Amino acid sequence: MGVQASLWTEFCNRPEDVDYLVFPRLAALAEVGWSRPEQKNWDLFLKAMDRYNEHLDVKGIGYARSMYNIDHKVTPKGKKLLVELSCIRPDVEIRYTEDGTEPVASSSLYASPLTVKSTTCMKAATFMNGEKMGETLLLDLQWNKATGKEVLASNEKRYVLTNGIRGSLRHTDFEWAGWYDEDASFVLDMGKRTPVKEVRIGCITNSGMAVHKPSLIRLSVSNNKKTFVPVGEITFFQEDIFKNRTAVEDAVFSGLDLNARYLKLEMENPGLCPIGDIREDQKIWMYFDELIVN
């Protein structure tokens, strides 16, 4: 018995794509397979891997530098946003800006979670010995009436619906809340009665991964969180839901004239992928990102 690492190449179009996914992960696989548990030391492994990467540089092998990239989590907190930044490497500095400029070695040093109260373009990157190590993280935090407000739902990713960040074309980018093989619903608490003219919710389609829009989205409002009154529905038909594509689009309720504290959105799952679809007869995911209220 031994260890194994598998690589699926359906998204690899060139040998360089394979190199990027394999290196330096092979070093980690060797560490797992050949080092005794009591001899494993993360800090020493990082130093050894840096030397290993120098060899890859000399050989012209394009390897992943994602170990230097920043992970983020932005959560609503008391009508504000709490921005948490981290990197799997403990030996780097995280430097950031809040005016949209590129971070440099002398930019503000991240030491604890940051509080954001309004529209902010934040950029951050890791540095080591004054040298930039990873890609620049862009957090374009956009404010609307729902930003920072509480979302009531059982989904653990519900916070992404009001954290000011739009999801990308990758439903795995940590900015999408997903529901699998079920209908979805959540309630937005505006905190008090609020004039509402428009409500929009972001939806993503990735037909290759069985990610699709709902067949119906219903908007209802309430001022007591008990009795909800429907105010609009948006219907999507099968030929549009299961179109072969990767795309992000907003479902928009416009022309509203409301004054409500609670907004409820209910989404109906369209069911299995139809005959002839790339994921024929498979259950689907529905993913939603920012809830925007104006």
Image: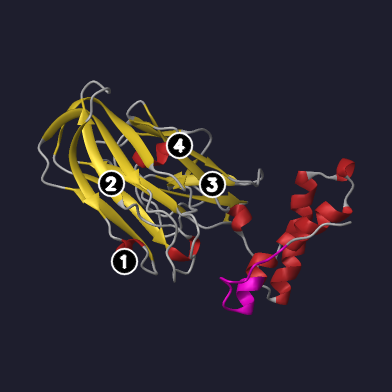
The first of marks 2 and 1 along the sequence is 2
Instruction: Estimate the x, y position of residue 123 in percent, counting from the top left.
Output: 43, 50
Instruction: Estimate the x, y position of residue 66 in percent, counting from the top left.
Output: 60, 57
For the residues carrying marks 3 and 1, which lies nearer the camera in this image? 1
Number of residues whose C-alpha sits closer than 10 Å to that of mark 4, classed few (under 14), some (14–19) or many (20 or more): some
Q: Is residue 221 above or below residue 45?
A: above
The residue tagged 3 is: 71
Tell me which segment is drawn in magenta. 6-18
Q: Which image quarter is the N terminus in? A: bottom right
CA–CA distance in space, label 2 to label 3: 32 Å
CB atoms of marks 2 and 1 within 8 Å: no
CA–CA distance in space, label 4 to label 2: 17 Å
Report whether residue 62 is seen. Answer: no
CB atoms of marks 4 and 1 within 8 Å: no
Q: Nearer the viewer, residue 16 or 114?
A: 16
Number of residues whose C-alpha sits closer than 10 Å to that of mark 1, classed few (under 14), some (14–19) or many (20 or more): few
CB atoms of marks 2 and 3 within 8 Å: no
The first of marks 4 and 1 along the sequence is 4
At label 3, the amino acid type is Asp
Helix, strand or loop for disc 4:
loop
Q: Is residue 174 magenta?
A: no
Helix, strand or loop for disc 3:
strand
The residue tagged 2 is: 217
Q: Nearer the viewer, residue 108 or 72?
A: 72
